């Protein structure tokens, strides 16, 4: 009997939007509308969290909290977080469709996993209204997972396990050890670990490397290695049992793990 019954993928930085650029642009532009100049690094730091939680995490940092107080007359409150989120969502809905290209090899990897009899699930830190812009674009490129759990579908998001529990039910798969969770961020890896799944990190397509395929193609292996190592270190610390470069490498990893079991 096969060891693995399903793979559950993240979206931005894992299956689409190589380098995870769409959320960064939306966060920076949204904060600017409130008179706060967030850096790309500040926008990337909490990546993987549900987007309202991401905004809250950014506003908890001393520099951005101080900027907010200077621009808005007081430290950020829960109402302020809600106000930023209300601007962020429609801005993201505009941006994400321009960054919905599948990662190279992603569609082929899914075909190989389906050929092994595995089901394909997905979770995301995006809201459902944002994902409604992405789903048709992904489907047109050959990627249509068997389910989707969005950040606003449940009372608690990443790094908790509830979205993965929903995947177990939607996909009718168990036990948790038979499910692989694939993600490029610490909260997404932690989501899989909390649910008891095998967590696999992706290093070069995601938030930590923050490079396009063209960027990587122009780099030497000596230049790429530190990006890979940094991502692998952080994802491993979050609980990833294995770290691959991109989802294109997942079928080979699954085959090795199945052969060794």
Image (spheres, rainbow, N blue to C red):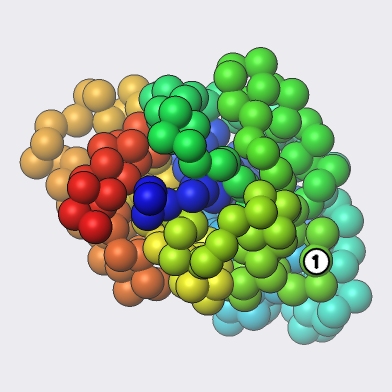
Q: Position of residue 93 (x, y in %)?
A: 79, 37
Left or right: residue 162 compared with residue 204: right
Image quarter of the C terminus? bottom left
Residue visible at 74% across and 73% down in the picture? 156
Q: Please tell me which residue is depicted at 77% across the width and 83% down the height of the picture.
A: 75
Q: Residue furthest top?
A: 140
Whole-percent x, y for residue 67 in the image: 67, 72
- Residue 145: image location, x then y, percent: 63, 36
Query: Number of marks in the image?
Result: 1
On the picture, is 27 further left or further right than 185?
Answer: right
Is residue 248 at least partly visible in the picture? yes
- Judged from the image, the secondary structure of the residue bearing numbered disc 1 is loop
Residue found at x 52% / y 66%: 175
- Tell me: residue 230, above or below residue 103: below
Residue 105 shown left or right of residue 151 in the figure: left
Side of 54 relative to 207 (left or right) = right
Give the residue at the far left of this rendering.
Answer: 222
Res 17 visible: no
* Above-or-below relation of 179 to 75: above
| Residue that label 1 marks | 154
Packing grade of label 1 (10 A; few <14, some 14-19, many >=20) is few
Q: Nearer the viewer, residue 232 or 199?
A: 199
Residue 128 place in picture, x, y as percent: 81, 47
Indicate whether 61 appears above or below 228. Answer: below
Name the residue at 84% across, 43% down. 129
């Amino acid at each position: 009997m096969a060891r693995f019954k399903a793979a559950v993928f993240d979206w931005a930085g894992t299956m689409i939007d190589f380098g995870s650029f769409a959320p960064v642009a939306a966060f920076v532009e949204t904060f600017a509308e409130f008179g706060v100049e967030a850096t790309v690094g500040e926008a990337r730091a909490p990546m993987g969290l549900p987007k309202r939680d991401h905004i809250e995490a950014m506003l908890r940092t001393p520099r951005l909290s101080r900027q907010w107080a200077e621009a808005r007359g007081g430290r950020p409150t829960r109402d302020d977080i809600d106000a930023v989120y209300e601007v962020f969502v429609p801005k993201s809905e505009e941006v994400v469709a321009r960054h919905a290209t599948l990662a190279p090899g992603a569609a082929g990897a899914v075909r190989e996993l389906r050929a092994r009899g595995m089901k394909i699930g997905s979770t995301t830190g995006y809201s459902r209204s944002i994902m409604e812009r992405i789903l048709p674009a992904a489907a047109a490129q050959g990627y249509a997972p068997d389910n989707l759990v969005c950040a606003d579908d449940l009372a608690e998001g990443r790094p908790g396990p509830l979205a993965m529990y929903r995947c177990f039910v939607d996909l009718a798969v168990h036990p948790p050890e038979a499910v692989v969770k694939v993600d490029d961020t610490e909260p997404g890896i932690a989501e899989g670990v909390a649910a008891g799944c095998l967590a696999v990190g992706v290093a070069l397509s995601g938030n930590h490397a923050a490079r396009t395929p063209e960027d990587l193609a122009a780099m030497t292996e000596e230049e790429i290695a530190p990006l890979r190592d940094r991502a692998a270190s952080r994802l491993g610390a979050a609980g990833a049992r294995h770290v691959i470069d991109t989802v294109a490498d997942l079928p080979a990893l699954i085959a090795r793990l199945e052969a060794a079991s």
